[in-house]
Amino acid sequence: MQVAMDTQLSIFGIEAHPPGPGDLDGLLAGGGQVVRLGGTARVSIVVDAAWRVRVLIAEFTRRGLATSWDKATIEGHFGVRTAYSSRLAPLGTRWLRGAVKRPPPDFFLDGQRLRLWCAAAGQPTEDGDGYSLHLGTEEECWKPVGKALAMAGLPAELLGVRAGGPLYRIEGRRRVAHLAEVVGDPPADVPPGMWPGKKVQDAKPDSTVPVSSKSARKREPGSGRPAATPREAVFPGEPGLFDL
């Protein structure tokens, strides 16, 4: 049994492959959106906490993707997006049927993809024995995403809007522990209790977000665009954007 579990972790864990643009499949499994423009595409998502902004910007930067953020129309939420990039064009091709988002036939979830989904829309249950991954509004996406979770060894229950969803809830300490092994250690900005495998703890609301600085930019590999480097500041009245 241990050999089987180790094999499963080696296939689905974050060590299975280095970070890459294709990992943003994990955001599209949830509430993320992809838009095509010519031979490029951009991925965006709305998140409910500033710490998620910082974590996602760090993850995008690791993948050489320039990033921006701003306040969302929903109070207390933020929009995070990549710049248009040819490196994201394959995601647009695979996920869009015209302007409609649908998981591709070969869609799967692994550690890198699940890590991004947890960062953007993951939340433990109050008793700490379960973990929820919030979905987007496209109902046709839910079943393929649930199948991909099960294939990764994480069968989950689909909950609707009345139950706080739409979301997939992974129940049981053993399954949550498996999720924690697959997605790896929590990023530094994750509040206590919010990452898989950790009990829920009281955490103060996070009111800081990263802002741009000309001295805090680096070039995106393989392009002339600068990629944003995360920095922290108090959220101003008008949110600053990363220069792209």
Image (cartoon, rainbow, N blue to C red):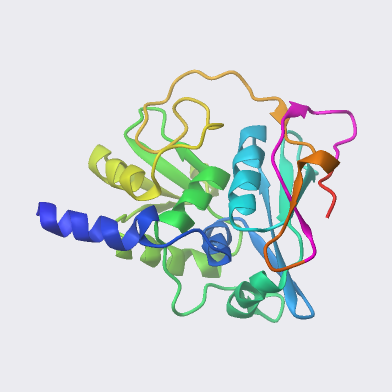
User: Residue 144 or 165: which is nearer the viewer?
Assistant: 144
Q: Is residue 142 left or right of residue 77?
A: left
Residue drawn at point x = 38 percent, y = 44 percent: 184
Say which quadrant the C terminus sits in: bottom right
User: Residue 27 or 244: which is nearer the viewer?
Assistant: 244
The part of the chain drawn in magenta is 224-240
* Dominant secondary structure of the residues highlighted in magenta in the image: loop
Q: Is residue 78 visible?
A: yes
Instruction: Say how many tags the image has.
Output: 0
Magenta run includes residue 228: yes
User: Residue 184 or 44: which is nearer the viewer?
Assistant: 184
Q: Is residue 162 above or below residue 226?
A: above
Residue at the farthest left position: 1
Residue drawn at point x = 39 percent, y = 54 percent: 14
Q: Is residue 205 above or below residue 231?
A: above
Q: Is residue 213 visible?
A: no
Q: Position of residue 129 (x, y in %)?
A: 31, 34
